[in-house]
Image: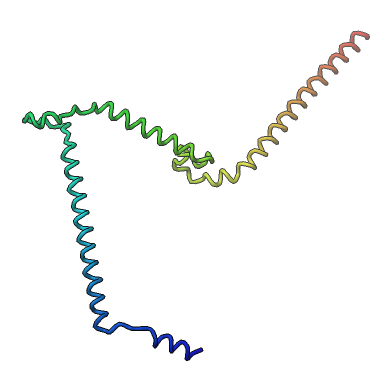
Amino acid sequence: MNCAVRLLVSETKRPHPSQGLVHRGAFFAEAAKMSKAKMSKAADEKSEQVNQALMKLRFQNYNPRTEKLKKFREEGSDPRELLREITEAQAELLKSTNRKFGDPSLDLDNLIPRKGSWDMERALQPKLERLEKRTEKAILEIVKRKLGSELNREETLRRADISSDED
């Protein structure tokens, strides 16, 4: 197998070393022509862009003196109108970004700086809720006791009145 590979390699024609230089030189010459063509094409495109920019002359803040340039005069927009458009665009952008977030904690309105103890408050919130429920139950129980004791007093007073009336 090793001999067969050697034979195939030796049978292939190799160009003379001087022929390789000719081929390389032709390659570089073609590459230079192509790069010149690309550069000239880029220059043509740039000159077209400049011509188009010149054709779009607009004077908003300058009053041209010549009649030739006066036809390009445009009235400037009202700054108040421009400010209104900008604020509307910003408000719309904020609304669209708020809609993108499904989580209300990621809402842009919630991005204000927080107090230093916000994490402690968040950790204690479930305990505070349980404490509030227990407090409400305790208050309700105290009120029931008071009402019960008042009813017992009234009943004892009524019994006392009934017993005194009988005597």
Taking the spot 24% from the left edge, 26% from the top edge, the residue there is 78
User: Taking 112 as reference, is 12 above or below it?
Assistant: below
Residue 55 picture location, percent across and down: 17, 38
Return the residue found at the far left. 66
Based on the displayed image, in which of its 4 quarters is residue 153 positioned?
Answer: top right
Residue 60 picture location, percent across and down: 17, 31
What kind of colouring is applied to the model shown? rainbow
Based on the displayed image, in which of its 4 quarters is residue 84 positioned?
Answer: top left
User: Taking 12 as reference, is 50 above or below it?
Assistant: above
Taking the spot 19% from the left edge, 56% from the top edge, the residue there is 40
Residue 56 picture location, percent across and down: 19, 36
* Left or right of residue 141: residue 129: left
Taking the spot 33% from the left edge, 83% from the top edge, the residue there is 14
* Left or right of residue 65: residue 149: right
Rendered-image quadrant of the C terminus? top right
Number of on-image labels: 0
Q: Nearer the viewer, residue 82 or 148?
A: 82
* Left or right of residue 127: residue 143: right
Q: Nearer the viewer, residue 143 or 3?
A: 3
Q: Nearer the viewer, residue 8 or 139?
A: 8
Return the residue found at the far right. 167
Based on the displayed image, in which of its 4 quarters is residue 30 positioned?
Answer: bottom left
Residue 117 picture location, percent across and down: 51, 45
* Left or right of residue 157: residue 146: left
Taking the spot 20% from the left edge, 49% from the top edge, the residue there is 46
